[in-house]
Image (cartoon, rainbow, N blue to C red):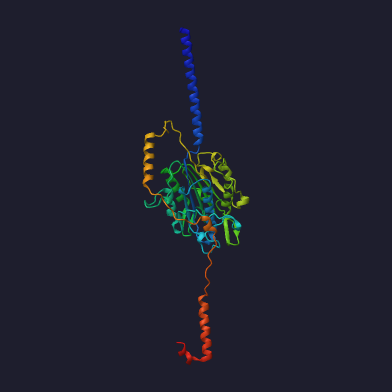
Amino acid sequence: MVAAFSFSKGLTTLSGLLLLSFGSLAASQIEDQAEQFFRSGHTNNWAVLVCTSRFWFNYRHVANTLSVYRSVKRLGIPDSHIVLMLADDMACNPRNPKPATVFSHKNMELNVYGDDVEVDYRSYEVTVENFLRVLTGRIPPSTPRSKRLLSDDRSNILIYMTGHGGNGFLKFQDSEEITNIELADAFEQMWQKRRYNELLFIIDTCQGASMYERFYSPNIMALASSQVGEDSLSHQPDPAIGVHLMDRYTFYVLEFLEEINPASQTNMNDLFQVCPRSLCVSTPGHRTDLFQRDPKNVLITDFFGSVRKVEITTETISLQPDLEIMESRDKKDWMDEELMEPLQYAEQLPVAQIIHQKPKLKDWHPPGGFILGLWALIIMVFFKTYGIKHMKFIF
């Protein structure tokens, strides 16, 4: 009897140890999965896209920015998380042969302006001061939400800039400029204020690499279209529009992004190789020494896509609805429906018929100049025939 009791007690202890070991193994697996799931440490994505150039001959800079805007929206970043700054409105420029359009490919193949572009800062709102205020969050309280960068310490931010620049500066509106020191200090303020988790900086301008030389804040990865002393060249001239449509570096970056989908496993090392000197004519550069992760472990979608991540919790949450509350709510809704009168809508012409219906023919009226000329001819003939002495018979 005692032996049987000891044997059963030993089995109980052994089973407990096995359950404990299996439980710890399962817990470690869950932790590994969670660590892999949150490998980038971010829970939301933001994009700040800036075109700093005005005037029609800088059409390509607006097309650059709108093309990046189109790509990040396609990969899932909503307009509420995009701050779009365009220094000029090329779509409504009087020299645009196709109003309300901006094309990024020759022969007008791809309109990147689209029907749902939300420009947050336009024309003379695009200044160095406003750009730095957006980054650092030092904006007036009356500023609408669409003009704010509402990021936090779990945000991955893509900052794309294009325009005319030189060694250590980027011009805004051909009237002012931002230096690489000012930009580096703004990023440091963002880090100190916990406004980003990781930051990807891309710039397409002449001597673009000079703009990230002074960066000193952690978790920043930077790419540029050209090295110090090099120009960034344009691409795809269009005879109908009369200007170049894009810059070379941005063109090949976007050609690469077109192959990316939200579930893609393509990493940043692949992005570094998209535009060699043989294609760009300039030498693109990148800087990763401030970035904590290996670029080969950083997915393209960590910056160009949107995440919808969840956090694991050990708390028990009841998903069973309270029947009494549900019944009272249903009863109230039923009484409201009884009191409300049925809604009636006027008959409307279907949208398809509105679009395809033939335009109404206008009544023909002779032009005003024609009638005036006819009266002048009648009076001249009258004067030549009867002279001025017979004018009293007319009036």
Q: Position of residue 54 (x, y in %)?
A: 50, 59
- Whether residue 9 is situated above or below residue 125 in the rendered picture: above
Instruction: Identify the residue at the far bottom of this view.
Output: 389
Q: Nearer the viewer, residue 382 or 33?
A: 382
Instruction: Identify the residue at the far top of this view.
Output: 1
Q: Position of residue 281 (x, y in %)?
A: 61, 53
- Whether residue 12 is situated above or below residue 100 in the rendered picture: above
Q: Residue at x 52, y 86 (%)?
A: 380
Q: Where is residue 290 in the image (x, y as percent from the top left)?
A: 50, 42
Question: Looking at the image, can residue 101 be seen?
Answer: no
Count up the numbered dots: 0
- Whether residue 385 is situated above or below residue 291 in the rendered picture: below
Question: Looking at the image, can residue 56 be seen?
Answer: yes
Q: Which of 105 and 166 is in front in this view?
A: 105
Q: Position of residue 311 (x, y in %)?
A: 45, 35
Instruction: Identify the residue at the far right of this view.
Output: 278
Quadrant containing the C terminus in the rendered view: bottom left
Q: Which of 20 and 380 is in front in this view?
A: 380
